[in-house]
Image: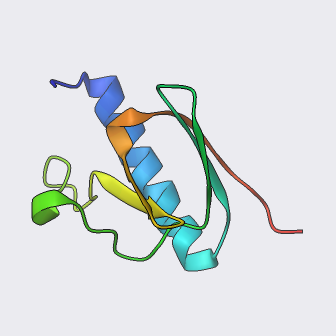
Amino acid sequence: MELSEGQEHFIANLGEACEAACLARLTVELELGDGRLTVGVPRSSPTGPNDQEIDHTGINPYIEIDDELVMLERVVSYRVFRPA
């Protein structure tokens, strides 16, 4: 699937936010295109099929949250929660 420039920026921003949340052990919520929510702390260095990256940005197109591997292209919105 060919992504628009705006979609690529969204995915890159999402990838960076998830990497930062992983380092700080912050909980994120990802809303997927099918309406499903995935909530948890992203894992360090997620790996996906063939260890790909998004347009040589170094950002993996997959993120692992609570043992679920999520393709960033499927995410339509996300939130990062501030710790209590």
- Residue 54 seen in render: yes
Above or below for 5 versus 43: above
74 left or right of 60 in image: right
Please, which residue is most extreme toward the right here?
84
Q: Residue at point 15% right, 65% down? A: 51
Above or below for 56 versus 12: below
Above or below for 12 versus 46: above
Q: Residue at point 90% right, 68% down? A: 84
79 left or right of 70 in image: right
Quadrant of the image occupied by residue 8: top left
Please, which residue is most extreme toward the left here?
50
Q: Position of residue 30 (x, y in %)?
A: 57, 44
Q: Residue at point 79% right, 61% down? A: 82
Q: Nearer the viewer, residue 56 or 28?
A: 28
Q: Position of residue 26 (x, y in %)?
A: 67, 68
Q: Position of residue 55 (x, y in %)?
A: 14, 47
38 left or right of 84 in image: left
